[in-house]
């Protein structure tokens, strides 16, 4: 339990949760690394060794991996569709992180390496219809992934494979499908659909304006995986014999319109939707085929969307109200001085 575990991207949403997951399991030696200043990390553990470093730099990767038994790479420059579609070069540059981390793991004798890939690797031709057939692992080829972000993920998957085949480094790859939950990005442009919808409906509840902007026509379909399922899946895949990239996502399919209605029900308000047909919306349909993970592990993500969104909405509502109250107090203070 004292073997060194490295979590790259620990200042992010999933990475921060993963550090806490291992600490809760009793692991005592965690090195958490992220490029962001500590005050910008979503969660900061008082127990872990917290390091601020840019892992696109090979020297920093060597420092991060030295002495480690297991390395979990969740570091990437990414966000929701609004960010991915408008920052393709930044997304592609994350290839430096995975490449340098793999080299460093090989050279420092790391036992196991986990790479967080994405459903964005899948062939776009298989995601044109809202009535999507669940995506199987083999559907990533022939390659036609999401431009920028998806290409970087697919290339990095191949790098993991070749480091395993050529150098004997044990690598595991999971393709995440829309992970959500508390302690994530919920405003600012990098948030994903579940958090963005929660924020908009919290604002509607507070302001009384119940018209909600929805990107696209809202008919696009997705599956969303709650963070607790993601963490358990990472752990199980890392310590399995699964050498190929594998889906890690819920297979509970929903439309964006239905997701909006679900959050409104949780908030106990009635809303009207205003559709922005010019906004980025991604592919028309995407869902996870969980046949292989069931075969390998006898398990697949099972936390329902309603259960996960209720917890996520509660957290975002608390964050929103805390920020709103602070802004009100600030305004009152400046107003009193005036």
Image: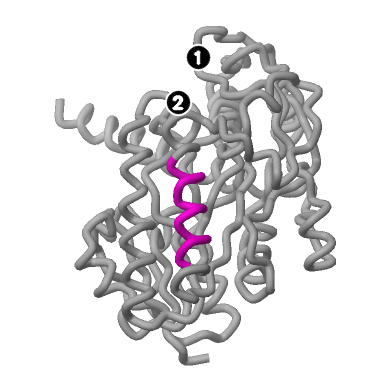
Task: Indicate left or right for 72 with 337 as reference.
Answer: right
Task: Indicate left or right for 270 with 117 as reference.
Answer: right
Let me know if residue 158 is in the magenta part. Answer: yes
Q: Which residues are magenta?
A: 152-163
Which label sits on residue 279? 1
Vertical side of 225 occupied by 233: above or below = below
Q: Say whether marks 2 and 1 touch (CB < 8 Å).
A: yes
**Quick one: 306 or 208, which is closer to the camera?**
306
Q: Residue furthest bottom?
A: 2
Vertical side of 323 occupied by 44: above or below = below
Residue 24 is situated, as x and y percent measured from the top left of the image, at 57, 78
The residue lying at 61 percent from left, 9 percent from top is: 274
**Quick one: 66 or 260, which is closer to the camera?**
66
**Quick one: 19 or 203, which is closer to the camera?**
19
Residue 204 is situated, as x and y percent measured from the top left of the image, at 58, 22
Q: Residue furthest front?
A: 166
Let me know if residue 107 is in the magenta part. Answer: no
Residue 309 in sight here: no
The residue lying at 67 percent from left, 63 percent from top is: 233
Label 1: state its secondary structure.
loop
Crowdedness near tag 1: few (<14), some (14–19) or many (≥20) residues, C-alpha within 10 Å: few
The residue lying at 56 percent from left, 45 percent from top is: 118
**Mark 2 sits on what residue?**
82
Residue 71 is situated, as x and y percent measured from the top left of the image, at 45, 72
Vertical side of 110 occupied by 184: above or below = above
Vertical side of 81 occupied by 46: above or below = below
Q: Quadrant of residue 37 in the image?
A: bottom left
């Amino acid at each position: 339990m004292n073997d060194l575990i490295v979590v790259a991207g620990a200042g992010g949403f999933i990475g921060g949760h993963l550090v806490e997951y291992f600490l809760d399991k009793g692991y005592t030696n965690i090195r958490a690394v992220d490029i962001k200043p500590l005050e910008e990390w979503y969660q900061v553990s008082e127990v872990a060794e917290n390091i601020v470093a840019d892992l696109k730099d090979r020297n920093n990767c060597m420092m991060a991996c030295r002495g480690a038994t297991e390395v979990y790479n969740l570091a990437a420059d990414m966000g929701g569709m609004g960010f991915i579609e408008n920052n393709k070069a930044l997304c592609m540059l994350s290839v430096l992180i995975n490449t340098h981390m793999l080299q460093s793991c090989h050279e420092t004798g790391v036992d196991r390496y986990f790479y967080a890939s994405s459903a964005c690797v899948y062939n776009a031709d298989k995601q044109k219809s809202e009535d999507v057939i669940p995506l199987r692992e083999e559907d990533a080829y022939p390659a036609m992934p999401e431009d920028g972000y998806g290409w970087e993920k697919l290339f990095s998957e191949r790098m993991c494979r070749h480091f395993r085949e050529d150098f004997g480094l044990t690598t595991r790859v999971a393709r995440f499908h829309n992970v959500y939950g508390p302690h994530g990005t919920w405003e600012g442009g990098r948030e994903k659909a579940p958090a963005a919808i929660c924020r908009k409906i919290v604002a509607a509840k507070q302001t009384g304006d119940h018209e909600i902007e929805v990107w696209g026509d809202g008919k696009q379909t997705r599956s969303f995986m709650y963070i607790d399922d993601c963490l358990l899946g990472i752990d199980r895949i890392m310590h399995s014999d699964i050498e190929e990239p594998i889906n890690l996502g819920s297979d509970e399919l929903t439309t964006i319109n239905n997701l909006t209605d679900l959050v409104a029900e949780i908030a106990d308000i009635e809303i009207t939707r205003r559709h922005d047909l010019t906004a980025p919306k991604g592919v028309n349909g995407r869902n996870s085929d969980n046949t292989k993970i069931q075969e390998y592990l006898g398990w697949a993500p099972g936390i329902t969307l309603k259960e996960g969104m209720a917890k996520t909405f509660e957290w975002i509502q608390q964050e929103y109200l805390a920020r709103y109250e602070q802004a009100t107090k600030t305004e009152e203070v400046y107003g009193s001085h005036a």
